[in-house]
Amino acid sequence: MKSYKTELDPNNAQRTACLRAAGASRWAYNFGLRRKQEAWAARKAALAAGTPKDAAPKIPTAIDLHRELNRLKQIPVAQGGVAWMRESSKCAPQEGLRNLDRALDGFLRRVKAGQRPGYPRFKSRKRGIGSFTLTGAIRVTDRTIQLPRLGVLRLKERGYFPTDERVVAATVSEQAGRWFVSIRTDADPSRPHGTERLGVDVGVRKLAVCSDGTTFQNPRALRSAEQRMRVLQKAVTRKKRGGANPRKAVRRL
């Protein structure tokens, strides 16, 4: 598995579709977490009442929740359904439920190991739009990427994604008003094992110096990020309260 990530250049219609898909994934995650908590409470009460473990209510899996979600998609919104979710790809809520299963499995595993992990919490729109994952027919060209139900989206970076590898999944995310896509590919290593040797000295002033004379400069990402944060923080404090500009400045920060 290899991963690549770059920025998208979507139009207004595609931005709306991305927002809708991210909302579907977020809603499915919260729906699944709520249903699992209800099932845990019912199972705990049944076991406390003396019910055998085999007869106690089961904890629904991601597949069970996805089937329940499919039934809700057939019900109009006015009647408590989520028919609006049919406008997005089925992969967005399905992968959201799978992410929930992985989060809970990791939580239980760390608890058994004696750690004190944080319990998975509900996703809030106030903490960010989030992301969604798509699988299936994903095609990549030199300048574009084709995603299910989203169509062909332009890429801001040309020639970065490989066009000769099989794309397994694509994750679209939003950060401060900018949209990014990360793809996972499945390809065999193209570089054969050789017998050459190379020494690498890692330092501070220079990130790395190789024995063949190649040097890598230290990008000093933390220093540049701190300088950028100071500029953005000043912009937040200078904005006049009550309008949309303060919210935009906070989102950039």
Image (spheres, helix red, strand yellow):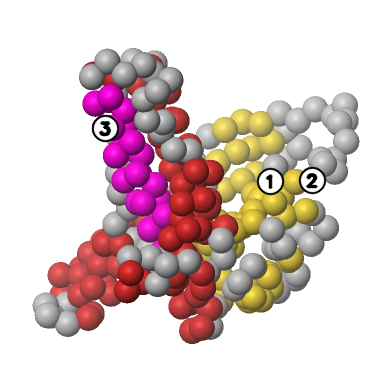
| Front residue (pair 179, 136) | 136
Look at mark 2 in the image and give the residue it sits on: 187
Mark 2 vs mark 1, CA separation in Å: 8 Å
**Residue at left 57%, top 65%?**
89
Q: Is residue 27 left or right of residue 91?
A: left
Question: Label 3: which residue?
Answer: 41
Magenta range is: 22-46
Name the quadrant containing residue 169. bottom right
Q: Secondary structure at mark 3?
A: helix
Q: Position of residue 120 (x, y in %)?
A: 33, 39
Which quarter of the image is occupied by the C terminus?
A: bottom left
Q: CA distance from mark 1 to mark 3?
A: 40 Å
Q: Amino acid at mark 1?
A: Lys
The foreground one among 217 and 27 is 27
Give the label, 1 or 3, closer to the camera. Answer: 3
**Count of residue discs:** 3
The reply, left or right, for residue 123 in relation to residue 103 is: left
Asked if the residues shown at circle 2 and circle 1 are in contact, with their CB atoms under 8 angstroms apart, the answer is: yes
- The 10 Å Cα crowd at callout 2, few under 14, some 14 to 19, many 20 or more, is few
Amino acid type of the residue tagged 2 in the rendering:
Ala
Q: Position of residue 101 (x, y in %)?
A: 46, 38
Query: Which one is earlier in the sequence, the residue at label 1 or at label 3?
Result: 1
Figure quadrant of residue 113:
top left
Q: Which residue is mark 1?
A: 2
Res 151 seen here: yes
Point out residue 104 in the picture as x, y percentages from the top left corner: 40, 34
Residue 96 visible in the snapshot: no
The residue drawn where x is 74% and y is 65% is: 139
Measured as percent of width and height from the top left, residue 58 is found at 41, 31
